[in-house]
Amino acid sequence: MATYRTLDDLECRGKRVLLRADLNVPLKDGKVADDSRITRLAPTITELAEKGAKVAVLSHFGRPKGKRDPAFSLRPVLPALERALSGENVLFVEDCVGEKARRVVAALKPGEVALLENLRFHPGEEANSPEFARELAALGDLYVNDAFSASHRAHASIALLPRLLPAAAGRLMEAELRALESALEAPQRPVLALVGGAKVSTKLDLLGNLVGKVNILALCGAMANTILFAEGFDVGRSLCEREMAESAGRLLALARERNCRLILPEDAVVAAELSPSAPTRTVAIASVPSDAMILDIGPRTVEGIRAALREARTLLWNGPLGAFETPPFDRGTAAVAREVATLTQAGKMRSIAGGGDTLAALAAAGCLEGLSYVSTAGGAFLEWLEGRELPGVKALEPIDRDHSGTSRFP
């Protein structure tokens, strides 16, 4: 993995620092409903401010399609950002480019912070426009990317702006890169990847990359139904991409070719409908009723995964293992999450998880704080696991390696 400047490498006292953040957070009744991305960004802002930087925070919000739309203003995020900064005042700027924005940012005193309006109010952002990137660059002296979760986008503030100013990774970006490197580039083995979710079609690239990098691959959730169908099992009325059976078969063959041990559900919790009040049965995978749906992994599958977890030294987790949003079909995911947290806290495993549904499932199980690292990134996390090059990571200028060529991230 390449090496990148971090905040340790920047002399930023008195300098205008353009901090690319991801404040694309959910709102409810005009207020931030989940501030996890904001609280994770706060340490980078605080550190820059304490070092005497003039901090201008750049972010997108929603999909205004290149036009100014009050429904997508970043202003409602301001109170949550100020709370995350322990009540420090943050100035809101009505635009992210132009003379007024330049004047306001230049007038900031060392240690002060401004939040600029939605980047996507300008079509040049998503069009990756060099002209728009130059307009942004005119605001600052230095650039810091702390938006790993947006770094899979080839947008102007992500891919071009860091080429116009001295650039570095913020603390959240640095933590994300370190966690992912530890899991895929130089992991402690055996490595177990636990992959769930609804559709195998959306994760074929991910799975194809993982079978060449991990020792054990456990497949669960509705996507496992397609794999089971390809193996000749009747999955009843379960969600299943039957048209993907051939691709699923090739994946199975690739895993065997690369000596990646596969764990598939042995038993399942089934019901006639996805409802909290629906009668449930636990059946062997070979005995799924034709009129039932697989909605969770069964106890034998849970125990098989727990045994594999006790064997592993590194875990990558993406996707819930059942329909966790609807109890009682959350039990399998919760049981596995508790085992992961226990092993992690005992120092027996390094565990990295990511993806929106994964975070929600871990939070519901009360295990969000029990893992080594939980990524708030969705698409970027998946694309990294797929082995893709992320524009925002690539754009950060590498610094000199030491003679061994090793990463600066331990």
Image (spheres, helix red, strand yellow):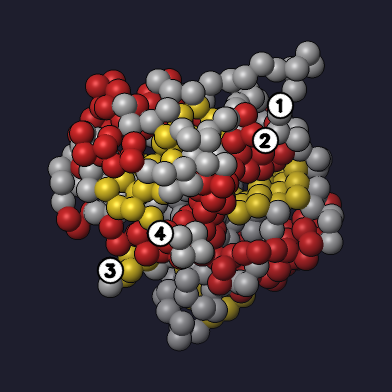
| Residue placed most toward the observer, 179 or 40 | 40
Give neighbour class at mark 4: few <14, some 14-19, many 20+ (Cα, 10 Å).
some
Q: Nearer the viewer, mark 4 or mark 1?
A: 4
Label for residue 407?
Answer: 1
Give neighbour class at mark 3: few <14, some 14-19, many 20+ (Cα, 10 Å).
few
The disc, 2 or 3, on the residue closer to the chain's N-terminal end is 3
The disc, 3 or 4, on the residue closer to the chain's N-terminal end is 3
Disc 4 marks a residue whose amino acid type is: Asn
- Count of numbered circles in the view: 4
Disc 3 marks a residue whose amino acid type is: Gly
44 left or right, relative to 99: right
Q: Nearer the viewer, mark 2 or mark 3?
A: 3
Residue matched to label 3:
30
Residue matched to label 4:
89
* Tags 2 and 4 touching, CB below 8 Å: no
The disc, 4 or 1, on the residue closer to the chain's N-terminal end is 4
Residue 7, horizontal then vertical, whole percent: 59, 36
Q: Residue at x 64, y 58 (%)?
A: 265
Q: Nearer the viewer, mark 2 or mark 1?
A: 1
Q: Residue at x 38, y 31 (%)?
A: 140
* Tags 2 and 1 touching, CB below 8 Å: yes
Q: Residue at x 63, y 23 (%)?
A: 2
Name which quarter of the figure residue 298 lies in.
bottom right
16 left or right, relative to 223: left
Residue 258, horizontal then vertical, whole percent: 71, 30
Residue 162, horizontal then vertical, whole percent: 44, 25
Disc 1 marks a residue whose amino acid type is: Ser
